[in-house]
Image (spheres, rainbow, N blue to C red):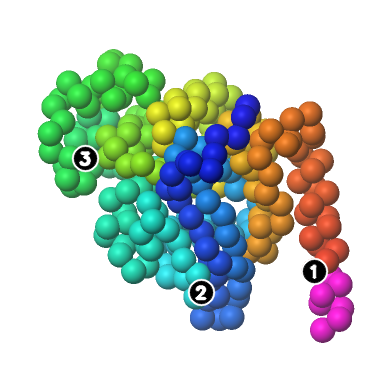
Amino acid sequence: MSEKQTPDSVIRLEAVGLTKRYEDGVLALDHISFSVAAGQIYAMLGGNGAGKTTTINLFLNLIEPTEGEARINGIVTHKEPLKAKKNVAFVSENVMLYGNFTALQNLEFFSRIGGKTAYTRDDFRDILLRVGLPATVHHKRLKEYSKGMRQKCGIAIAIAKSAPAILLDEPTAGLDPKAGYDFLRLLETLRNEGKAILMSTHDIFRAKEVADVVAIMDSGRIIMQQPATALVGQDLENLYMHHMAGRTAALRQEQASC
């Protein structure tokens, strides 16, 4: 897999010195900087508390940064949140849709409130087919769907929004191998259409398979960032453990010197 970004690529997502310290003094994110270009998948790896979800939340303006900026299509999210949100779609680990609505009803509802009023019912059916939901389940209530099917419905809503950037928070967590495989193929299709995709994940193997850039986070910092081309032939799991072990040792040394 080649790294997609070139000097002429359009930057869709960008973190610049992004920092978040909570009121209790916890430093959740410590001056991280990265960018995601159109037609690129950027995977953030890390354990619980690494700062992955905080990063996603800052891009969504669910929280405000202490320092630095999160930018979507060049728009600073905490300064122009409504304008920024028009340029991004979001799919979480547990897709929050209406269980008593069918897939078609969910897709139509979220598209309408997002201002996408030109779609017809046939358009919605085509989008659901595209993400791998057959016509036989379009009229089923989402509470009858498996987790993989709900994820596909979430991606359908993201596609209908027609945003240039997509944020994914642990999108493959809890998916069976077939559902995970289908989801990655869908992400590849979206990347090839020019979407910029920022994905937080624990899943080392799927990250290596689909990402153009892989970053490892720990304690609010990016401790490694490499293009996928530089990771060819490497054992990403061992690399991850190596960096995490080095970071743990460095933290212990810092604490001992305090």
Q: Disc 2 or 3, which lies upstream in sequence?
A: 2
Label number found at residue 67: 2
Q: Is residue 225 left or right of residue 168?
A: right
Are the residues at dot 2 and dot 1 in contact (C-beta closer than 8 Å)?
no
Residues marked 1 and 3 touching at CB (< 8 Å)? no
Q: Amino acid at mark 3?
A: Ser
Element assignment for label 2: strand
Residue under circle 1? 251
Residue 175's place in the image compared with 82, above or below, is above
Residue drawn at 19 percent across, 35 percent down: 108
Region rendered in magenta: 252-258
What percent of the width, then of the height, locates residue 193? 40, 29
| Residue at image point 36% right, 59% down | 75
Q: What residue is at 27 percent from the left and 16 percent from the top?
A: 135
Q: Position of residue 160 (x, y in %)?
A: 27, 35
Disc marking residue 111: 3
Residue at horizontal 73%, vertical 36%? 230
Q: Which numbered disc, 2 or 1, marks the residue that appears first in the sequence?
A: 2
Residue 66 is left or right of residue 213, and the answer is: left
Outermost residue toward the bottom?
A: 258
Q: Determine crowd level at label 2: few under 14, some 14-19, many 20+ residues with C-alpha closer than 10 A.
A: some
Depth check, front residue: 11 or 204: 11
Task: Say if mark 2 contacts mark 3, CB within 8 Å.
Answer: no
User: Which of these two is toward me, 229 or 168?
Assistant: 229
Specify the quadrant of the image occupied by residue 83. Answer: bottom left
Q: Give the crowd class for mark 3: few <14, some 14-19, many >=20 residues within 10 Å.
A: many
Residue 203 placement, left or right of 158? right
Quarter of the C terminus within the rendering: bottom right
